[in-house]
Amino acid sequence: MTEDSWTDRIVGERMTVDQEFSSRIAGSRFTSQEWSLIMTATEFEIEHPGDPDRARIVANTEKIEQILPELENVRSQVGAMGGATPDQDSGSGGGIVDSIKGALGMGGDGGDSYEAEREAAETLTQEYAEQLQSHLESNGRWDSIRDSVADE
């Protein structure tokens, strides 16, 4: 089996968890469009699948770094259309001029901003992974999924 085969087997469960998790996204710093982008850069893995006591779903977020500039682009586009972005409620600006200055490295927080975004994305994706595992456990599917990964 390929690494993705176990995730292919839980598409229905993922859709249910996506719906349940949408309220968590709404309360986060990310829009649903940004969350979708984050999820495309996230792969889910099962650590220690052969050990029922230690096995858990984890979010592999190695590719998140690659989409951070695109998150800024999404926010810039929303801001240009007159929409509020999640960061604008802090009173720290966040308008188009600030976005352009940030893109040019003149914003003052540059890498710090990306670091905060990366950390927030990693935290949220791991929360999603935990909720997904909990959902699989409550539906009685966790052990069979974990066993299939252990057998690979």
Image (spheres, rainbow, N blue to C red):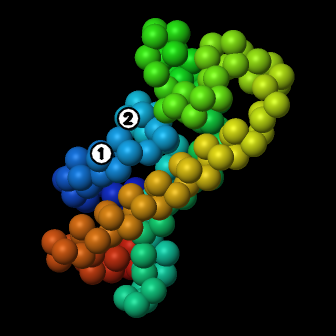
Mark 2 and mark 1: Cα distance apart in space: 8 Å
Query: Dot 2: within a 10 Å radius of its alpha carbon, few (fewer than 14), some, or many (20 or more) residues?
Result: few
Quadrant (top left/top right/bottom left/bottom right) for the N terminus? bottom left
Per the image, label 2 sits on a secondary structure element best described as: helix
> Sequence-wise, which precedes: disc 2 or disc 1?
1
Q: Nearer the viewer, residue 123 or 5?
A: 123
Query: Residue 9: where, in percent of width, then height?
Result: 25, 59
Per the image, label 1 sits on a secondary structure element best described as: helix
Tell me the number on the disc at residue 32.
Answer: 2
Question: Identity of the amino acid at label 1?
Answer: Ser
Left or right of 96? Residue 37 is left
Query: Dot 1: within a 10 Å radius of its alpha carbon, few (fewer than 14), some, or many (20 or more) residues?
Result: some
66 up-or-down from 20: above or below: above
Q: Nearer the viewer, residue 132 or 146?
A: 132
Tell me the number on the disc at residue 22.
Answer: 1
* Residue for point 52% across, 31% down: 89
Query: Residue 88: where, in percent of width, then height?
Result: 55, 28
Question: Identity of the amino acid at label 2?
Answer: Ser
> Does residue 78 appear anywhere in the picture?
yes
Query: Residue 143: where, in percent of width, then height?
Result: 27, 80
* Residue for point 56% across, 50% down: 120
* Residue for point 83% across, 22% down: 106
150 up-or-down from 13: above or below: below
Name the quadrant containing residue 49: bottom left
> Does residue 40 appear anywhere in the picture?
no
- Residue at the farthest left position: 139
Q: Nearer the viewer, residue 145 or 54?
A: 54
- Residue at the farthest top position: 81
Left or right of 99? Residue 71 is left
Left or right of 96? Residue 124 is left
Tell me the number on the disc at residue 43.
Answer: none
For the residues labelled 2 and 1, say whether their Cβ atoms are less than 8 Å apart: yes
